[in-house]
Image (cartoon, rainbow, N blue to C red):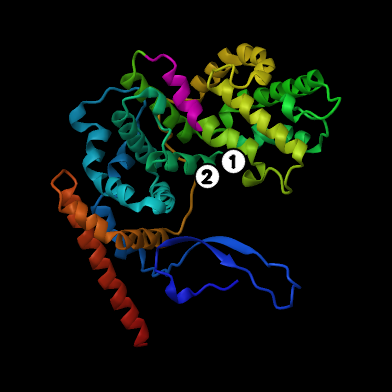
Amino acid sequence: MRCQLGRLQKGQMIDEWFPLSSHVPLKGIEPGSLRVRHRYSMEKIMPEEEYSEFKEVRFIEKFFQRQSHLTANNVIDPKCSPQMILQKDFHAIYALASVCGQDRTLLASLLLQIFRHEKAEAPLLRTLNDREINMEDEATTLFRATTLASTLMEQYMKATATPFVHYALKDTILKIMESKQSCELNPSKLEKNEDVSTNLAHLLNILSELVEKIFMAADILPPTLRFIYGCLQKSVQQKFPSNHTMRTRVVSGFVFLRLICPAILNPRMFNIIADPPSPTAARTLTLVAKSVQNLANLVEFGAKEPYMEGVNPFIKNNKHRMIMFLDELGNVPDLPEHPEPFRTDLSRNLAALHEVCATHSDELRTLSNERGAQQHVLKKLLAITELLQQKQTQYAMSNSNR
């Protein structure tokens, strides 16, 4: 495979197919092609203090580092509430989210590492989640779209909740990998002479074992993540007071839809297994994930998938326990005084964040010319981006003269 590196533009994500070639004749056999998603980047990392201007734009909010008793349930004067203080300061982040497009995942990763380094990930996630909730009018579509807030939450859960996932899922998944017993219930997929009642009994045994481990694992989740869940519950109650299930669904939408069920469907992604599952095991994992997700949604199977209705008694029997579990996850009213330890290369992350700003400077400039609350912040961000580029040039010149 050959890729012409000279035609790649810095910072741009490319998704394309490359023809494969062979050094030996293949006698009429086409070697095929390979799809590659790639990005060309050049890292120019200056000393950390050179990026102090970013903090003037309030990418990192020092206010929260002075809050030792920030709670999910307190009532604060709106004139001095954390949300009000951050709204004006986060305009640069909101603007970057609106122009980054395919770079949203990269932006989320950089912001998360920077804010975790500053022990300020909870206010970042809380504020972006609250903004998402305030902008949504329909409870049924809340956090369904892929936004900066949902991407940050997903990345934060994957970064901090691996011990929870392993404790809750690993033993059961390993048993599924070793078992040759099918759980297939779909008549169109059953093998000849296969007993669907035996398959259902096996599936129900797996589900019972799995949810028991999940329900016992609440305390393994990091307290900061559970505090954020509690903030989500409080915010949706205020936004949708007549919807009594939103408190449960907003947490299950993250814990199950974006963490537990993806880990069941693709356990290799979470380092639970090393080898791909057999077709039987893969189908079992799919049926288990489908059943667990319905339980988390507090919804029974219906006419759309009638062959799954045998799982409904299991769902009915565990609905109340699921609600109790999800409420327990958010039962951390105070932000922990000592966040989980985290180490990162801050200079490298700040340099990458500057590169994102430089890559999207034209779009940011267009936004800065529009009237609105973010105009002043964006003009300042653009000026700082240009200043950092000048500093990079000076560093490059000084190094070349040595």
Q: Is residue 268 above or below residue 258?
A: below
Looking at the image, can residue 331 be seen?
no
- Residue at screen point 67% across, 29% down: 287
Instruction: Tell me the quarter of the picture where residue 400 sits.
Output: bottom left
Which quadrant holds the N terminus? bottom right
For mark 1, what is the residue?
162
- Left or right? Give the position of 17 relative to 330: right
- Left or right? Give the position of 97 relative to 143: left
Q: Nearer the viewer, residue 184 or 163?
A: 184
x and y percentages locating residue 44 in the rendered image: 39, 70
The kind of residue on which mark 1 rests is Thr
Which structural element holds mark 2?
A: helix
Classify 10 Å Cα crowding around label 1: few (below 14), some (14-19), many (20 and above): some
Main SS type for the magenta part? Answer: helix
Q: CA distance from mark 2 to mark 1?
A: 7 Å
- Residue at screen point 73% across, 20% down: 204
For mark 2, what is the residue?
159
Q: Is residue 207 above or below residue 57?
A: above
Q: Is residue 249 magenta?
A: yes
Q: Is residue 45 above or below residue 84?
A: below
Residue lying at the far front of the rendered structure: 28
- Residue at screen point 43% across, 20% down: 247
Chain part drawn in magenta: 243-254
Residue lying at the far bottom of the rendered structure: 401
